[in-house]
Image (cartoon, grey):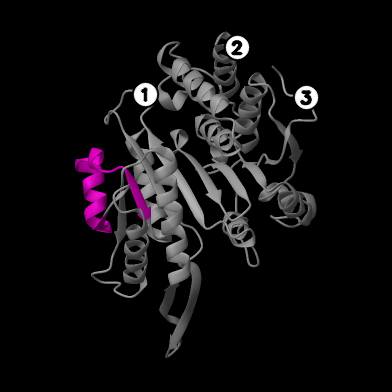
Amino acid sequence: MENTSSNKIPATLIPGDGIGPEVVEATVRVLDALGSPFDWDVQVAGMAGVAAVGDPLPTATLDSIRARKLVLKGPLTTPVGEGFRSSNVRLRETFELFGNVRPAKTLIPGRYQDIDLVLIRENLAGFYVANEYYIPVGNDPRAIAVSSGINTREGSERIARFAFEYAIKNGRKKITVVHKANILKKLTGLFLEAAREVAKEYEGRVEIEDMIVDACAMQLVLNPWRFDMLLCTNLFGDILSDQLAGLVGGLGMAPGSNFGTDTAIFEAVHGSAPDIAGMGIANPISLMLAAAMMLTHVGLEQDAQRLRVAIDETLNTDNVRTRDLTGQASTLEFADAVCQRLRAQ
């Protein structure tokens, strides 16, 4: 039964830049086929925000997110030039979105089969605090570059507890803590120490192990099936989550979500791809899967599962695929094929 305006869930919709409006349109189309569960407040950010009001994160957009606390977001472009920081980083900081969740699951046959992993990334600390400066030497004002990272015990315990709670809720059995405590003994050593302390609360329910980041990167290529969940600091999580996406076909197949205490943002993890913007050939699966995560988050798990099944059937039964997946379907043709599957369920 279709949702009425009275029971729709308020949410902010940010089309984004480049291919963002195209994949957002495709995703909204499949959500409409599910009964239009969300009441959208459409806002701009990124280059669209700069064009509209001279700010990549306009006040109206921030106010909308504060009010609704739920966001579906297309990719954003960070303007080049002084005074503009990454809009994604600003969003994380503004709404204290400390937990980044990046699942990777095989959807179509490829080099790796039966991949089903989840990476949890601490989203606010590490080297992403970007505390950087130059030290001049002689006539060279940029002779030495210095960058310092920050991890706190409180923040490390918070993301570890978030990861263990995710494991319990989603039936996951093992968490691998990824670190570089052999070299970055204090920065990542504290993260590892905090994770081990939190793990004691879940003993007998979720297994914990730890692995140095370079060894983990190698094992993800050699034997990714040995992993269930990865718990990472900010920088390592950023790198390894893209590696996970590579196991299942690329960034176009990998959704992402960011969680704070009371706000959640769901997004495509790929960039804005300005080189193909407006051509109608972008793969919308990343954002569609992010929308499925959003449905789960608001308690509509049945709808989330329906969407995932429809995407799977469109790819593997109907063989409708976008060009990056060696198919011929346009962005909206793929969306329409998913809608047809949803209506046939």
> Which of the 4 image quadrants contains residue 249?
top left
- Quadrant holding the N terminus: top right
Residue range in magenta is 209-231
Q: Mark 2 points at which residue?
A: 343
- How many residues crowd mark 1 within 10 Å: few (<14), some (14–19), many (20+)? some
Seen in the picture, residue 303 relative to 54 is either above or below; the reply is above
Quick one: SS at disc 1? loop
Residue placed most toward the observer, 130 or 94? 94
Task: Tell whether position 229 is magenta.
Answer: yes
- Do the residues under discs 2 and 1 have CB atoms within 8 angstroms? no
Q: Which residue is drawn at 36% across and 23% down?
A: 108
Residue 60, x across and y down, in percent: 79, 52
- Quadrant holding the C terminus: top right
Q: Which residue is drawn at 80% across and 28% down?
A: 5
- How many residues crowd mark 2 within 10 Å: few (<14), some (14–19), many (20+)? few
Q: Name the residue under label 3.
A: 4
Amino acid type of disc 1? Answer: Ile
Q: Distance between the residues labelled 3 and 2?
A: 18 Å
Task: Tell whether position 270 is magenta.
Answer: no
Of the two numbered discs 1 and 3 in the rendering, the one whose residue sits closer to the viewer: 3
Q: Earlier in the sequence, mark 3 or mark 2?
A: 3
Residue 17 appears in the picture as rendered: no
Q: Which of marks 2 and 1 is nearer the N terminus?
A: 1
What number is the disc on residue 108?
Answer: 1
Amino acid type of disc 2? Answer: Arg
- How many residues crowd mark 3 within 10 Å: few (<14), some (14–19), many (20+)? few
Seen in the picture, residue 179 relative to 218 is either above or below; the reply is below
Q: Which residue is drawn at 40% across and 44% down?
A: 168
Q: Earlier in the sequence, mark 1 or mark 3?
A: 3
